[in-house]
Image: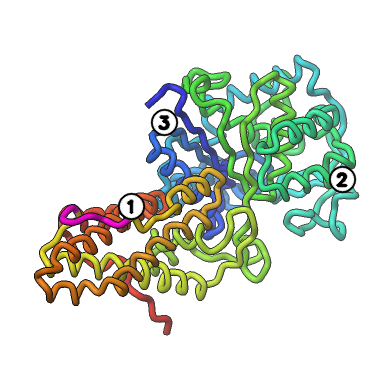
Amino acid sequence: MTDNKTFYITTPIYYPSAKLHIGHTYCSVAADVMARYKRSRGYDVMFLTGTDEHGLKIEKAAKDAGKTPIEFLDEIVIGKGGITDLWKLMNISYDRFIRTTDDYHVAAIQKIFKALYDKGAIYKGTYEGKYCVPCESFWTEAQLVDGKCPDCGREVRDEKEEAYFFRQSEYGERILKLYEEHPEFLQPESRKKEMISSFIKPGLEDICVSRTSFKWGIPVDFDPGHVVYVWVDALFNYMTALGYQNEKYDDLAKFWPCDVHFVGKEIVRFHSILWPAMLMALDLPLPKRVYGHGWLVLDGAKMSKSTGNIVDPYVLADTYGVDALRYFLLSEFPFGIDGNFTNDLLVTRINSDLANNLGNLVSRSLAMADKYGLKENDGNATNLFGGKRESFHANMEQFAFQAALADVFDVLSRANKHIDETTPWLLAKDEAKRAELADVISTLLVTIRGCTELLAPFMPDSAGKILEQLDEGKRGVLFPRIIEK
C-alpha cells in the first residue's frame, strides 16, 4: 500500500430521530459499500458518520419529552434501538463516529467561528425573515413554495433577532468558477444545474450563522447569548473529526481534502455553496466531490416521521435479511434519483436476483461439484466475465451502484446459462468427457468466486458464507425464495 492511496468518505451527520426509517439507511449503506469497495482495492479508508445534535428542534423535542437535551440525545443515539444500533444492524463499517456535542468538536467550532469573524467573513446584524424549524433552514420570501418551506412543505415562521452573518453573497462567482473548473465537484449534473439556477444566478445572500432565540447550541465564546448556527457546526465536522482545530485526532494531513461527501439532495445547497464558501474564506482546501443522491419515497413523498409514511428497517431486516435489504437499496434505483419503495419491489428483487440467479447458481454448482468429486482447480476455467469486471470497477468509481450490480448479475446469468449449454449431468455419464466436465465445474466455481468478491461490499455476510462454501465445504441455503401471502 502506498502512502497516498487513501480514501475519505462521509455521510451527513444525522438528526437524532426517535423513529428511524429505511430512508435513514440509504446514504449510509451506499457509503459503506463504497468504503468496503475501496478497502478491497487496497486503499487506507476513513469512513465518517455521526449525529447532528444541536438546534432549536432538539431543544424543543427534549423539553417535550421532559428530559435535558443530552439525556434525550443519548437515548436515541447510543441507547437501545438508536442510531448506533441501526448502523450495527445494517453492517455499517464506519471508522469514526462524531457527535457534535463531543467536547473536542465544540471547542474546535468556537475557534473556527472566531477565525471567520477575525477574517471579516462574519459580521453582526439583525436577522428578519422566514425560518423552517424542522429543516433548520432560512428562506427568502421568493424561495418559499405556496408560503411554505420548499424542502419539506411545512410552515415557516417569521424570525427577527440579533445575529451574525456570513458573507456568502461574495462567493457566487468563485463557486461558479469552482463548478466550471472542477465539473466533478458536484454530482450528478442535475444538482449542479439546480444550484446555479435556483441559488447562484439569482444572487447569493448573506446567511445567518448565529441564533439568540434559543440556547441549545455551541456558544459563541466572544459574544455571550449567541449560539452557532447548526449548519456551520455540522459542516465543519468533516474536518474536526480528523483533528482540525483540536488535538483529539491527527488525521487531517492524511485524509483531507475529502474524496466525497454523500448527502441527500435536500442538503446539497449547504454542501455545495455554503461549505466551499466558508472553506474559501479560511483559505482551506475544498473537498473533491459532493454527491447529492435521491430519496427513497413512498407514493412520491419523502419518508418522514411527521407525515407518517415510514418503513421500519428493523422489521424489513428481520423479515428479509440485512444483505437482501442492502442489495435492494442499491440495485433497484440509480443512486442519483428518487426511488419509490414498495415491499413488492423488494420481494421481486430477492426472488429474481438473489434466489433464482445467485442462490440457484451457487446451489447447483456446489451440488454438482460434490456429486462428481470435482473442485475449483480441477479443470481449465472459461472466462465468462468478458468486459464486465472492468465495467463494474468503472461504474463503482462513478457511484453507479445499480449499473455495477447489473454487471455482476449479467455474469451470474451467463453462468447459469452455461450450465444449460454444457449439460454437465450428461458429461458425467461418459468417462471420456471427465476433463470436459472438470472444465465446466471449474468455470462455474471460478465465476462464483469472482462475482462473490465483487458483491462483497454490498452483501458482506452473504459473500462470506459463499466463500466458506467454496473453501470449507459448508453448505446451506443462501437466499430462500419468498412467497408472499
- Element type where label 1 sits in the image: helix
- Compare residues 41 and 276 and report the one nearer the observer: 41
Q: Position of residue 17 (x, y in %)?
A: 56, 52
Residue 44 is labelled as 3
> Is residue 380 part of the magenta span, yes or no?
yes
> Is any part of residue 213 visible from this angle?
yes
Residue drawn at 68 percent across, 40 percent down: 186
* Labels 1 and 3: the sequence-earlier one: 3
Q: Position of residue 362 (x, y in %)?
A: 28, 65
- Which residue position holds label 1? 450
Q: Which mark is nearer the camera, 1 or 2?
A: 1
- Up the image or down, 370 lies above or below 402; here it is below
**Residue lying furthest top:** 118
- Which residue position holds label 2? 140
User: What amino acid type should be assigned to the residue bearing mark 3?
Assistant: Asp
**Residue lying furthest bottom:** 485
Q: Quadrant location of residue 123?
A: top right
* Labels 2 and 3: the sequence-earlier one: 3
The image quadrant where one finds the C terminus is bottom left
